[in-house]
Image: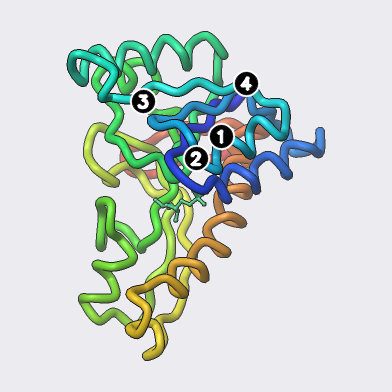
């Protein structure tokens, strides 16, 4: 299966996918990496691995629709079977969703449906939960609302309140990378079918 991976930051999830894809048995290749901003470690990781990249910043377009159209066209050029949003901090637009809904995999650093949005780790910590984790799910038109494929659990310790959730996020990301690599590999090798809120693998 061909993947396009979208990133906005450090790209450690991307790195885990790059390493997994190095083994032909994994069943996926990263055709391109896209970003909504330049100068991020995620893009450097792609370049170091010889993967084509594209960057479309919302600020460079007259409106969100134009940005969405450009992102869709750039993604389409690489003919992905699956799109992975790995720390991509923008909501995908209508055109992108119309083209790829059902084939976009996202990873979120909380146990959905709790704590959706951009601050899942901080919000879970502030709420006082004792366990949190990460969720790999298909993207639908809501924010972190699509059908869940897999979740991983991470315990919260009292110390986690001292640093604003940084150490907790790192522990979550360790679990997240393994989970994302596992799910994307299964989808790539076996295919999937969506039945309501259930994602059936293989089809
Ligand atoms: C991940 O925890 C992702 O779920 C969140 O941002 C982090 C991205 O990390 N939205 P990285 O860029 O893959 O290192």
Where is residue 62? Give x, y as percent.
19, 13
Q: Is mark 3 within 8 Å of ligand 1?
A: no
- Mark nearest the camera among 1 and 3 is 1
Q: Quadrant of residue 124?
A: bottom left
For label 2, the crowd category at 10 Å Cα-Cα, with few meaning under 14, some 14 to 19 and many 20 or more, is some
Counting residues from the start of the chain, the first of labels 1 and 4 encountered is 1
Residue 68 location, quadrant: top left
Q: Which residue is mark 1?
A: 43
In what element is the residue under mark 2? loop
- Distance from the alpha carbon under mark 2 to that under mark 3: 26 Å
Q: Secondary structure at mark 4?
A: loop
Where is residue 30? Give x, y as percent: 64, 28
Q: Callout 1: helix, strand or loop?
A: helix
Q: Nearer the viewer, residue 119 or 162?
A: 162
Q: Quadrant where the N terminus lies? A: top right
Closest to the camera, between mark 2 and mark 3, is: 2
Q: Secondary structure at mark 3?
A: loop
Image coordinates of residue 9 in percent, x first then y, are 46, 45
Q: Are marks 2 and 1 in contact (CB under 8 Å)?
A: yes
Which is nearer the eye, 191 or 41? 41
Taking the view exactly as shown, the residue that stands out farthest to the right is: 24
Colour mode of the rendering: rainbow
Residue at (39%, 82%) from the top-left corner?
A: 160
Badge 1: few (under 14), some or many (20 or more) residues near its Cα, within 10 Å? many
Which sits earlier in the primary sequence, circle 2 or circle 3?
2
Q: CA distance from mark 2 to mark 4?
A: 15 Å
* Front tag of 2 and 4: 2
Mark earlier in primary sequence (1, 3): 1
Marks 2/1: CA–CA distance: 6 Å
Which residue was labeled with disc 3?
101
């Amino acid at each position: 299966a061909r993947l396009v991976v979208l990133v906005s930051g450090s790209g450690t999830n991307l790195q885990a996918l790059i390493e997994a894809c190095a083994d032909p048995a994994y069943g996926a290749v990263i055709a391109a990496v896209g970003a909504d901003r330049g100068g991020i470690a995620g893009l450097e990781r792609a370049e170091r691995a010889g993967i084509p990249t594209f960057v479309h910043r919302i600020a460079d377009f007259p409106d969100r629709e134009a940005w969405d159209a450009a992102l869709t066209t750039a993604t389409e050029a690489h003919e992905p079977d699956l799109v992975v949003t790995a720390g991509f901090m923008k909501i995908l637009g209508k055109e992108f969703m119309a083209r790829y809904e059902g084939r976009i995999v996202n990873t979120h650093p909380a146990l959905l449906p709790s704590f959706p949005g951009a601050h899942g780790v901080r919000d879970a910590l502030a709420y006082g939960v004792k366990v949190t984790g990460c969720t790999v799910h298909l993207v639908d038109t809501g924010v972190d609302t699509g059908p869940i494929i897999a979740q991983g659990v991470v315990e919260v310790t009292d110390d986690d309140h001292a640093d604003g959730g940084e150490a907790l996020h790192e522990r979550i990301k360790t679990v997240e990378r393994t989970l994302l690599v596992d799910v994307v590999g299964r989808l790539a090798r076996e295919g999937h079918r969506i039945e309501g809120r259930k994602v059936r693998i293989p089809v």
